[in-house]
Amino acid sequence: MNPTTNPTIRTENLSRSFGRTAALAQVSLTVPEGAIYALVGANGAGKTTLIKLLMNIFRPTAGSAQVLGIDSRRLAGKRFTHIGYVSENQELPETMTVGAMLDYCRGFYPEWDRSLEAQLVRQFDLPLGRKLKHLSRGMKMKAAFASSLAYRPTLIVLDEPFSGLDPLVRDELIEGLLERAPETTIFLSSHDLAEIESLSSHVGFLEQGRLLFSEEMPVLMHRFRDVTVTLDAPAPLPANLPTAWLQPQTADCVVRFVHSNYSEPAAARELAEFFPAARNIAFDPLPLRQIFLAISKSGRARSEAQADPHAAAKGTAA
Amino acid sequence: MKQILHIFLKDTRRFWPEILVSLAITAGFIWLCPGEWQRAGIYGADSYSLAGGSLMAMSSALEVLVPVTWWLLIARVIQAESLVGDRQFWLTRPYEWKKLLAAKVLFVVAFIYLPIFIAQCLLMLLGGFNPVSYIPGLFCNLLLLTGILVLPIVALATVTSNFARLTLTLLGVAPGLLILAAISALAAMRGSSIATPIDSRISFVCLFCVCVAAIAKQYARRDARLSRLLLVAIPVLFVASGLIAPDVLLINRTHPLVAGQAGAPVQLSYHLDPRTGFSASVGTPASIIGIPIPLEANTATEGTIVVFEGAKADIEAPDGAHWTSPWQRLDVPYQVPGENHDYLTLFTMPRALYNRWKGMPLSVHVTYELSLAKAAPATRVAMPMSDFAVPDFGVCTPLTNWMIPFNEATGIACRSALRQPTITYISLVWSDAPCNGKPAEAGSGVQGSGWAGGLDRETADFGISPVKTVSFLLSNGLKDQRGQEPRYLCPGTPITFTRYDLIRRAQAEVSIRDFHLPDLPRGQD
């Protein structure tokens, strides 16, 4: 199947406002079939809102979303037999035991695989006889995972699934998830960038409700570079630096910034133009965490500059 | 169906303690409720005793507790899959809203309707009524319970996220309902509205439909704001309808005005007996004055009683000034056909107007909303000393009293199935002396009589208990004014029950020229 012609998720100008606050503004993205798509962004960026729009928990104010080829607003009932959804703040049926919850969920899914359920119970070491309300947060997440994976969903949607979990539980969940990856599409939001980097094939970055980029992980990793320019003598930062250079800083003879649109020949030409006296220029790959921080900080600085240009100018001078 | 049963069984497993409590309270109600009718027969003996009084209080408490357990059950089962919020586990599971709703309906049917239906059948049997003969009435009662109790609770449970919020909402709604009741009472006092048979049905249908719409909308869309707006619309609608009062339209429809006196089913004439002076009365609030209008009513059909339900007055002063009252509710005692044709009706008017027009010769035109009921063949029962059934009326019990000798009756207490009986005239002969188990002597004794029931023709009245106590007061039941000494009903004394069936509703008019507003009693003017 061609992923571009029949994506698992596709949004077009998807927007959602709560009163006068725009939680999500004109988000257009595509998640191809088989992808592990990671949605990243700071707190309040709109990740959960986007996921709830996709799951028809919220209705869009404008724009549209298609999930498994269906308008998200029509996503209900049987359509959910192909979707697994786990959220960090989901309210589980706390009065049920783990076993009762699995029994109950089983009745809704014709494709429920009892052997997979047993395997997940073993793998996550789930106590079947204990009530969910008596379980730790990690155990609850594992129970939620088991109840969402046992029917082999075509699409797994995870909203901050690893948030606040200890490393052991995280590893167990990721392991369980990756075992399902070949047969499914995974769409997840997370703050855990190290994990995302290791497991995602695609990444989207939300900032204040806007999608700054959405692309394949290797392309992204290639596009961002930590650039270090060593000069002969200390010099102030040149004016009118390219907007793709994020967080430019200078200290003594060294200028550092994050290049957000790196391609080797073009970057070399640009740098030669701005720093003709450069003694050495180094381009280092960045981990996802650094990319995330660079984008977030530069986005915040941009917002502050727009809000108060005078103070921002003073800050730059300092 | 599989999904419906799946959800239903899950709810049953989860809420079995609540179900058991509800069933236990219903069972307690079945056990204690018949005691009220049995104790009605030995009223003095039991109700004043500690045990009897406690049992009666418990029975009354259980009658309130039964719907309270419904509230608990409904809240718990509806909110197990809460429709408010965005974090619920079930939102992203393959629930189909129609099946979810059907599962909840099935739960309510299984653990609320079925138990109460069985309880009502048992209570009818215990009350001396065959439930099979009252199946439509029993279903009608369930419909009323649905519209007035169950649906509003379900609707509120669908727009609140948990039991605490539902309780707070109900506590918030209660003062609102009190305000609504106060507004309605005020409107009634000011005479701006009277109920017609259509009124209550319209209100019921409105309440029913709005609740159903809010519930369906909430299940289909989970748009709590919209559903809450719908629910808020109900009291607003009621208050608005009470204030705007489209009574004229409804009354003209239910009680048509017959043009011309010749064709009128009843001839009304102003009949002021000069020997009996009538005075005006101060109403509540004191800013309204009650004006009596004594009437003589002659019906076209023999053996017919006139039931005055409402009045509207139109007054013209000598200077050409006009005042028309709204429709006002009337409560005029019935008169036995052939014995008395005199009725005392009353309308109210503002005190300021009364003061301005007092002493002036006025032209008064009063339109009455009335019903005519014709006597059916009477049922005569020779008084037994145990329960006795009266066809088309109910079951009666001799009334005894601990202060009088054993096996003496000082009256009768009656009960009816599902609703108050049709207007019935009860007549009997009292004995001045205890009967000692013997029939009264022929020709001796004092005549006693009273009216019971009403014209309402609904199949059932709203209520948890299907057996209704019929209230009536028999005249001459006491030998003296102080009420110390009762009269007695001897075994075999004939008691006559005459039912009056509605034959027609109509409007009739009376015009009075040179009418002078009567004076207020001394000290009240």
Image (cartoon, grey):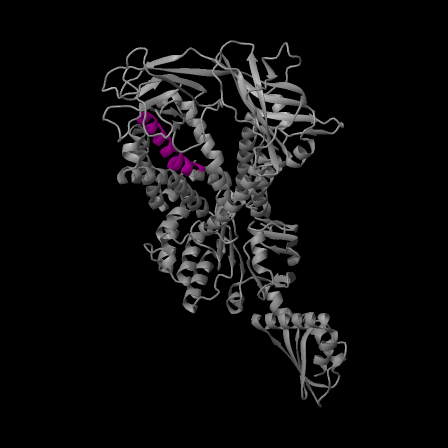
Q: Is residue B39 above or below residue B435?
A: below
Q: Is residue A108 visible?
A: no
* Viewer-closest of B200 and B437: B437
Residue at (60% x, 41% y) in the render: B236
Residue A162 image point, x, y percent: 48, 64
Q: Is residue B358 above or below residue A277?
A: above
Secondary structure predominantly adopted by residues drawn in magenta = helix
On the picture, is A139 further left or further right than B360? left
Residue A313 image point, x, y percent: 74, 78
Q: Is residue B414 above or below residue B62?
A: above
Residue A130 image point, x, y percent: 33, 56
Residue at (41% x, 45% y) in the render: B72
* Viewer-closest of B367 and B101: B367
Write the start and end of the magenta stretch as one range: B105-128
Which part of the image, by quadrant, shows the N terminus of chain B? top left
Q: Quadrant of residue B462?
A: top left
Q: Is residue A297 visible?
A: yes
Q: Residue furthest bottom?
A: A233
Q: Is residue B160 magenta?
A: no
On the picture, is A286 further left or further right than B324? left
Q: Is residue B105 above or below residue B415?
A: below
Q: Is residue B127 magenta?
A: yes
